[in-house]
Image: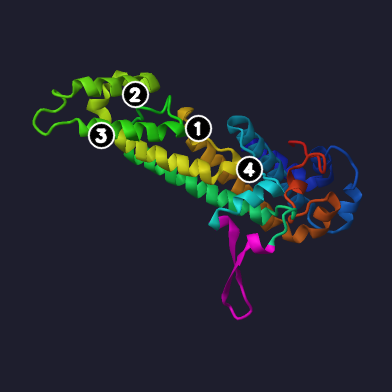
Amino acid sequence: MITEGFFLVMSVRDPKRILEKILGERKDLDRLEETGESLEQLINVLRDLVRCRQTRLWIMDSYGIDIVVSATTFTHLLEIPQINFIENSTRMLEIDTVSLKETRRFDDSVTVGNLNTILRELYRNLESIQGRLENEFSSLFLINEMRPDLIDVVVQQITSIKKFNGRLTGYMLSLNKVKPIERKFEKLFPDSIKVGSLRKIWPTVEKEIEFYKKCREMNKRWEALGIDLFQIIRESGLSNLRENVQELGNLLWNIVYNQRPLDQCLSILGIDFTDTSSLFDSNRINLNNR
């Protein structure tokens, strides 16, 4: 708390010094001051932007996902209706729905508004998957070896096992047919044999497979980002990913909210909210963590 108070005082007493540390040079400091805009508020915006960049890099390093997408990747993401369709209020206070597929050019830059839409929808999807995982499963039998292409294989194995389960005799009369299915299952999922044979655990596995189908659907939905939910869940990273997506969205919202009185300063620095690369590309504007 003392440290925070100290830096707050420093930013008020000598904002140009703080800006020099953040920007790494004295270039444009006089021009920034001459605008008459609040340098203290500019410092807060730039610090939030530094945290945005750090969060983006953490997600990239941890999951191989770059949330700050290119124009090409954004075009692919327009297959998601919640990203493609935007609502605008007309002068008559009516809601006009616009499809970005129809109005946006392929090489148009990705705006901060576009990025916020991506983050909001991705967070919602991750939250849905995490909710099902926490509420319906204390553990997952097959997660260590599960891949999207194995889902249909297991569905077929369960279907076959169920057919051989006699109402009165169980599997007693069909063991010669059940055993080969179980051996194939065990080769695919060696860890599963620790909790029992397929004929005993298939009801639990069947429910688990439905969850994996949802994960596969989400992987397909976000294929342009390269998301692999199976790997993320294996590494217990789902909660951290969701929280960092939320953090990045909150930071961007703060930046947009606080930038309104800083038009001249941001223009001098080259920050353009219609192009996310101006915020995240260190070659366009270098920012130090100060």
Amino acid beneath label 2: Phe
Q: Earlier in the sequence, mark 4 or mark 3?
A: 4
Left or right, residue 85 beside residue 230: right
What SS does tag 4 mark?
Answer: loop
Q: Position of residue 219 (x, y in %)?
A: 51, 41
Residue 223 lies within the magenta run: no
For label 4, the crowd category at 10 Å Cα-Cα, with few meaning under 14, some 14 to 19 and many 20 or more, is some
Q: Nearer the viewer, mark 4 or mark 3?
A: 3
Mark 2 vs mark 3: in front = 2
Quarter assignment of residue 215: top left
**Residue 174 in the image, given as x and y percentages of width and height:** 18, 24
Name the residue carrying label 1: 232
Could you tell me how far apart the alpha carbons at marks 1 and 4 are, in whole angstroms? 16 Å
Is 11 above or below relative to 94? above
Q: Nearer the viewer, mark 1 or mark 2?
A: 2
Which residue is identified by label 4? Answer: 67
Span colored in magenta? 82-103
Q: Relative to the observer, which residue lies in front, 66 or 29? A: 66
Task: Look at mark 3 in the image and give the residue it sits on.
Answer: 203
Where disc 1 sits, the SS reads: helix
Q: Which mark is residue 185?
A: 2
The one nearer the camera, 150 or 275, is: 150
Residue 43 appears in the rendering: no
Question: Measured from the top left, where is residue 210 in percent x and y?
Answer: 36, 40
- Rounded to the nearest whole Å, what is the CA distance between mark 1 and mark 3? 25 Å
